[in-house]
Image: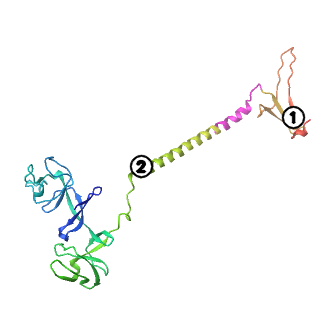
Amino acid sequence: MTETNAIASIHVLADETLGGIKREYVEVDRKAEVGEKIVIVEKADWDDWFGIGEIFTVDRTYHTEDGDVYCDDASSVHNVNGLIHLSEYHVLEPTDIVHIDGPDGTERYELTDRKAEVGEKVMYVNESGESYGIVTEVIAVGAGVVDVVEYEEPSGAVVVGMSHDRYRVLVPVEAEADEPQPADLIDVVSNLAARVGRLHDEIDTLHKDNRTLGEELARLKEQPKNEACAPIDAPLVFVQRKIGDVFDVYQDGKRLRGIKRIHIDAAMGEVTTHDIEFVSGATEEERP
């Protein structure tokens, strides 16, 4: 049975060189060699029976050395020799990650070439790196060998130890849930949209504040001009805080600055009356 992780292009296949233990393979876009596994990623001839995702083992390579290969299992009436073009496949390269069944389900381990410690899981391998796929546990570590929990091989041999160059340590791989996960694209877009919205509101608020400040500054700049140039139709109000003091001149509620004298013109032969409001005292009770 083949398991595939389409996102990472990882395939989990039984590895016969490890006694059928499931091993992870990764897709690589290159020319395949005899004996390697390949996976179909494109189809040049839709008359072939196999489809995308089908896995084969390379039996022969094409004589032109252009990357085309022959796989007997891919042969059919329309493709007698099982020819597969380079553009149709990716090579499946084995990784050091294997899947081992345990009491809590299948667990992932990395085959590591190093000296084992007591309590670690190990797997015997021969000079070619092949194994029966039997996992055991180290109970003692010596200078040149490790003692392991006794087990029997398919050949009938009982194994109680192995030299340091004849095993691989199985190091547990962290579960995917414990590993840092890439952010979901929808969440990323949603968060960015929210941030853009908040920034837009902040910019809009700053723009309004700047406009308000600008209007206030313009009003303050024009205020002296308004005070000095009050409407001529408004009555003049003379305010003297203390008797004998100088008086302030107000018009339309604004104090006029720089006024040293008031000149009232009347037409010749006309009687003109001018009302001048004179207020004395700082408070209403002090005024006459």
Where residue 160 sits, quadrant-wise, is: bottom left
- The type of colouring in the image is rainbow
Q: Residue 156 in magenta?
A: no
Few, some or many residues within 10 Å of mark 1 (<14, 14–19, 20+): some
Q: Which residue bears the numbered disc 2?
A: 189
Task: Give the alpha-carbon distance from disc 1 to disc 2, as whole Å.
Answer: 71 Å
Q: Residue 221 in magenta?
A: yes
Residue 131 x %, y %: 19, 73
Few, some or many residues within 10 Å of mark 2 (<14, 14–19, 20+): few
Viewer-closest of 21 and 285: 21
Q: What secondary structure is marked by label 1?
A: strand
Residue 264 x %, y %: 83, 23
Q: Amino acid at mark 2?
A: Val
Q: Is residue 271 left or right of residue 205?
A: right
Q: At 64% across and 36% down in the image, what residue appears?
A: 218
Direction top: furthest residue: 269
Q: Amino acid at mark 1?
A: Val
Q: Is residue 166 left or right of residue 282?
A: left
Q: What secondary structure is marked by label 2?
A: helix
Camera-nearest label, 1 or 2: 2
Q: At 58% across and 41% down in the image, what residue appears?
A: 208
Q: Which residue bears the numbered disc 1?
A: 279
Q: At 17% across and 82% down in the image, what residue appears?
A: 157
Q: 224 above or below 53?
A: above
Q: Which residues are magenta?
A: 217-233
Image quarter of the N terminus = bottom left
Where residue 5 sits, quadrant-wise, is: bottom left
Image quarter of the C terminus = top right
Residue 219 x %, y %: 66, 36
Where residue 63 sits, quadrant-wise, is: bottom left
Viewer-closest of 185 and 288: 185
